[in-house]
Image (tube, coloured by chain):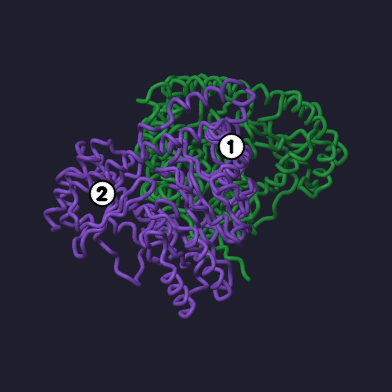
Chain colours: A green, B purple
Amino acid sequence: MNTALSALGRRTASPSISWLMKTALSRPKLISLAAGFTDNATLPVALSRKLLTSLLSSPKTGQPALQYGTTAGADNLRRLTATHLQKLDGGHDRAHSPERVIITGGSQQLLYMTLEALCDEGDLVLVEDPTYFVFLSILQSRGIQARGVKLERDGLDLVHLEKILTQLKESGQLHRMKALYLVTYFQNPTGATTSLAKKAGALKLLKKFEAAAGHPLYLLEDAAYRELRFDNSADVPTALTLPGARDRVIYTGTYSKPYAPGARLGFGLLPEPLFTTVQRIKGNHDFGTANLLQQLLARALATGQYDQHVTKVRKNYARKARVMKAALAEHFPASVEIWESGGGLYFWARLPQGIATGVKSKVFQMALKNDVLYVPGALCYAEDGARTKPDNEMRLSFGSASEANIRKGIARLGKVLKKFVR
Amino acid sequence: MNTALSALGRRTASPSISWLMKTALSRPKLISLAAGFTDNATLPVALSRKLLTSLLSSPKTGQPALQYGTTAGADNLRRLTATHLQKLDGGHDRAHSPERVIITGGSQQLLYMTLEALCDEGDLVLVEDPTYFVFLSILQSRGIQARGVKLERDGLDLVHLEKILTQLKESGQLHRMKALYLVTYFQNPTGATTSLAKKAGALKLLKKFEAAAGHPLYLLEDAAYRELRFDNSADVPTALTLPGARDRVIYTGTYSKPYAPGARLGFGLLPEPLFTTVQRIKGNHDFGTANLLQQLLARALATGQYDQHVTKVRKNYARKARVMKAALAEHFPASVEIWESGGGLYFWARLPQGIATGVKSKVFQMALKNDVLYVPGALCYAEDGARTKPDNEMRLSFGSASEANIRKGIARLGKVLKKFVR
């Protein structure tokens, strides 16, 4: 007898990361520099207790928090989210209005529903090369094609983007393309931040090719790591601040990384008709994210305690990044190229050509034997026949490991690398 | 220029209920007997405060609650859920093991992901006639066909089920059928409860037609209202207790109705290969439901305070159901057939043939003018060309309205009905 599974059901692969996670759990002494978890030490335990105690101290505020809400999210949190983004964008309010905000179960859910709303099987999304691997999992599951655009230290390579768009136009495939996906701040996995000029250039190119596509080409900006900036330097404005953004930019952010993944809240700002469509899809998924979590975050934002907390979180990651940077300088061979970031959770390491880092490679296996784990770079590249996947890179996270373990883990890994790299 | 929306995006309709909800909000004096909301007065505000304060009083328990977890859900909640179901099923443990449990953002999310895993566009699901309207919304959005099976007071009409299966076999459509969806306890919208004999009969019929279908035919049991039983009479066992259940029954339940919709948690127990597939899909949706909510519910269950709370909730709804029953007896014309339930949130009223209740009907419009709202029965019927939709029914909820408003609302509605019904 056949399986009753749908094509999507049959296609959906085991997430590439789950093997790594299982491996980590099975070796208790292993130091994981793979997980993108946030740091336990900075989770807002006392703050959340205080806010929830207050929220639930009267039926007047407690009952609505425990009742059903509306599909798009609680009005106060939508308003506070819009205001928060305006502030981050230097007072800009071109496309930051509350009625464009939808609150979701992490930004992951927003990405999923956006792809449901936009893409049929066989459609095409452009991504950075490399990019966030769970986004690639969604594409794989839904039968959506991906093409990788070269990534530079300040964001994607616009010349390469234009070349791909031209190729798609010439080969008659442009009508299948729906969006360009960018992780614009302290990118997962490379740590790269996209400059505003590159966001503007990308939006312009998309606009230019729309007539040939026959439909809007959206810029999907994922700002998941935006608030994890190490210093107080000016924040790069989002694509929402650009002319035309209101109609073509889909923006998504999250409260998971800066506040708490266990209170999983994300959000999106969407142009019509996507906003209405995603809202309807959300109605079918879960008719709105848990109100209790929404009211917790609304209190944190409204009282200014969210901002105070984020300041602490940023300092903590800045310190851990410095620890990893020093350890990398001390223990890694000089021929390994390191991408350093101004925020987020990751360093990106590029080994000399020809030295593979994948799960079957000698480097990975010896690292595992020495109880240290990283994310092989190849997992972060789309299935794109137009180029071979680089296999000589690794993502190194300082998110959840302690400072002592960051030092020890990098030392172990450096020792392994020195056997393969001069 | 065309829209860039996917077929799913273009197809997904505005939920039938959203017009009703907007209407309710726009008339402040309106008494809504339409909303399926739970009663504000019984929401566990103080209990949740106590449990969360304790959970967040130490980093040891607070940090894991605010951190990422695993996709299938927290181990303790999966175990407690399995144990809870075993208890409800009289100690039965045929298919109740924790490793078959997946924790979701309400049971709605489980229904959505199950349909993703099972159904391609054009596939077919059998539903009760009438059934839960948001399930119908998912089918509509995903392009899945529905056929309605006649519903009797003790569950679906097995003779009709066999007739439909035979027709599907003879017309060569059976290979498109994937599941039979039943809301088995105090059904939304009719209040009907499916007897164990009917669950067994349905499962047997599905098994009988599997060879002709060429794949498993699943029984999808939605027990959302199960714990809202008014008295202490014995609970009907779930289909999980039947022979063969481990391979063919998908069971879903929720903590939203008995505990709190604002701490939105549901769960499913699934056979392989569905469990693995749904878990992977869940990974792409949100890689696991918010841990903070999961740990809140785990504490409520583990300390026995969940059971104590549910006892209070049940008494409250039993009292409100008695109030509505008395009001119906006093104010409704005798020719209106009333389905009374032993639990849940609803009465089902059937007007004499020919008296329409839909949103454009005179009855509905006059009810609205008199500031009372109900759910027209026709919204709860699948698009099934094999029969015309009955349009003379209404769902009346005593969930969120106060006792005074239940009396007043039914009196208003009775007055309207007496103009149309002798």
Q: Quadrant of residue A60?
A: top left
Q: Can residue B2 be seen here?
A: no
Compared with B100, A256 (above or below) is above
Rendering coords of residue B388 (x, y %): 29, 69
Q: Amino acid at mark 2?
A: Tyr
Question: Could you tell me how far apart the alpha carbons at marks 2 and 1 are, in whole angstroms?
Answer: 57 Å
Rendering coords of residue B34 (x, y %): 29, 46
Rendering coords of residue A269 (x, y %): 42, 40
The secondary element bearing badge 2 is classed as: loop
Report which residue position mark 1 lands on.
Answer: A154
Rendering coords of residue B402 (x, y %): 28, 35
The secondary element bearing badge 1 is classed as: loop
Compared with A53, B153 (above or below) is below
Q: Residues within 10 Å of mark 1 (few under 14, many from 20)?
A: some
Q: Quick one: which residue is furthest to the left in this view? A: B419
Q: Residues within 10 Å of mark 2 (few under 14, many from 20)?
A: many
Residue A238 or residue A409, whichever sits in front = A409
Q: Amino acid at mark 1?
A: Asp
| Residues tagged 2 and 1 counted as in contact (Cβ below 8 A) | no
**Chain at tag 1:** A
Q: What quarter of the picture does the N terminus of chain A occupy?
A: bottom right
Q: Are discs 2 and 1 located on one and the same chain?
A: no
Q: Which mark is residue A186?
A: none
**Chain at tag 2:** B
Q: What quarter of the picture does the C terminus of chain A occupy?
A: top right
Residue at image coords 80%, 46%: A355
Q: For the residues carrying marks 2 and 1, which lies nearer the camera in this image? A: 2
Q: Quick one: which residue is furthest to the bottom in this view? A: B170
Residue B145 or residue A12, whichever sits in front = B145
Q: Can residue A410 be seen here?
A: yes
Compared with A282, B167 (above or below) is below
Report which residue position mark 2 lands on.
Answer: B374
